[in-house]
Amino acid sequence: MKWGRGFAFDMLGKNWAEVKVKALTPFARWLMEIIMASRSFSARCGHITRRLNANQPLTGKLLELALNIIDEMNHRGAEVDAIREKIRTGAQLTDYESHIMIDAILVGKRLE
């Protein structure tokens, strides 16, 4: 294992449990936290996408995350409010609403 200058970047594809965190510099620890947080968020967005594509209601933390993503939007219209209400109640989204949520809102949030 290389502990040199590019260590944090060498560890991107490795199992994080194997990393000796005490040996890392503060910058490398910070970088790892940023990378893990973005991977985690992206994975949770993927879970939301899969549930919506399968017409399954969102529950628990996924429901909370989806509602928070919609609530954080700056420009919301009546359509987005209707999508939020359907997601909150567990009602099935139309194809158009599902497209807006998956391809516009979630992708836009991932790119932020």
Image (cartoon, rainbow, N blue to C red):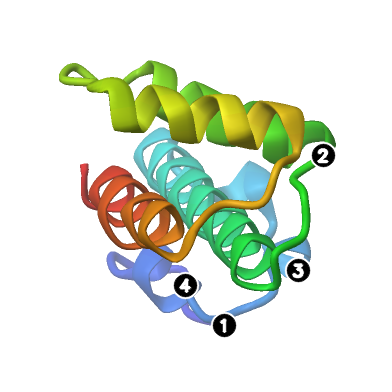
Please give the name of the residue rendered at 41% of the width and 51% of the height, measured from the top-left corner: 97
Q: Amino acid at mark 4?
A: Leu
Mark 3 or 4: the one toward you: 4
Mark 4 or 1: the one toward you: 4
| Quarter containing the N terminus | bottom right
| Quarter containing the C terminus | top left
Q: Which residue is mark 4?
A: 12
Q: Amino acid at mark 1?
A: Met
Q: Which residue is mark 1?
A: 1
Please give the name of the residue rendered at 35% of the width and 31% of the height, measured from the top-left corner: 80
Rendered image: mark on residue 59: 2
Please give the name of the residue rendered at 52% of the width and 48% of the height, measured from the top-left corner: 41
Q: Secondary structure at mark 3?
A: helix
Residue in the foreground of this view, choosing between 75 and 86: 86
Q: Earlier in the sequence, mark 3 or mark 2?
A: 3
Asked if 41 appears above or below 84 in the picture, the reply is below
